[in-house]
Image (cartoon, rainbow, N blue to C red):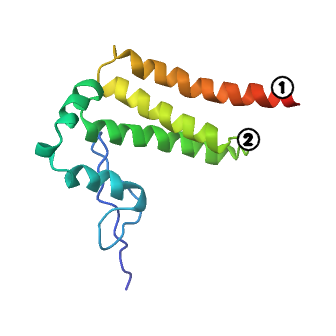
Amino acid sequence: MTMSVPTCKYEYPDRTKCWEQANKATGYCARHYLTATTARALPRHSMPVLDEREKTYGNYSKQAAFARELKDVVLSGITSSKNMEITPQMHESLDMICTKISRIIFGDPNYIDSWKDIAGYATLIVDILEGQKDKA
């Protein structure tokens, strides 16, 4: 007799399901638990700032899910390439750039600060790399 292992009940924007093993208590895998539960935890009526942010960045649930997918692709590439030269700072900048890309796609693509933020996160890494080059 084989016991089936529950899979995560998270659904991606394209309606496909996550295949990872789920926690029996929550029904979600570790990666999707916060994404799936956080949006429901905040009372919308007491957060008017959220309505303003949605005008700029788009629907949070859709934008966050897409950003997470982009970040998962980046992490998968880093992991499969076994590139040990990716520093924590580079990884964080890549994560933030994914978030900014997602906000541009789901929100206002003409919101210039999102584009400046992408350039800023890339510039932070350039500054670090140029500083290392100067010390060598």
Residue at 62% from the left image edge and 48% from the top image edge: 79
Marks 2 and 1, the one that precedes in the sequence: 2
Which numbered circle lies on residue 4? none
- How many labels were placed on the picture? 2
Q: Secondary structure at mark 1?
A: helix
In the image, residue 44 above or below residue 132: below
Q: Secondary structure at mark 2?
A: loop
The amino acid type, in three-letter code, at marker 2 is Glu
Rendered image quadrant of residue 125: top right
Rendered image quadrant of residue 134: top right
Question: Which residue of the protein is positioned furthest toward the bottom in this rendering?
Answer: 1
Residue 86 in percent (x, y) is at: 68, 41
On screen, residue 105 versus residue 124, left or right, reads left
Residue 107 in percent (x, y) is at: 29, 25
Front residue of 47/123: it is: 47
To which residue does mark 2 refer?
85
On screen, residue 81 versus residue 105, left or right, reads right
Front tag of 2 and 1: 1
Question: Which residue of the protein is positioned furthest toward the left in this rendering?
Answer: 45
To which residue does mark 1 refer?
134
Which image quadrant: the N terminus?
A: bottom left
Which image quadrant: the C terminus?
A: top right
Residue at 27% from the left image edge and 24% from the top image edge: 56
Residue at 30% from the left image edge and 28% from the top image edge: 57
Residue at 40% from the left image edge and 38% from the top image edge: 67
Residue 3 in percent (x, y) is at: 36, 80
Front residue of 17/102: it is: 102
Q: Mark 2 Cα within 10 Å, few/some/many (few <14, many 20+)?
A: few
On screen, residue 122 versus residue 85, left or right, reads left
The amino acid type, in three-letter code, at marker 1 is Asp
Residue 4 in percent (x, y) is at: 35, 75
Q: Residues under labels 2 and 1: Cα distance?
A: 18 Å
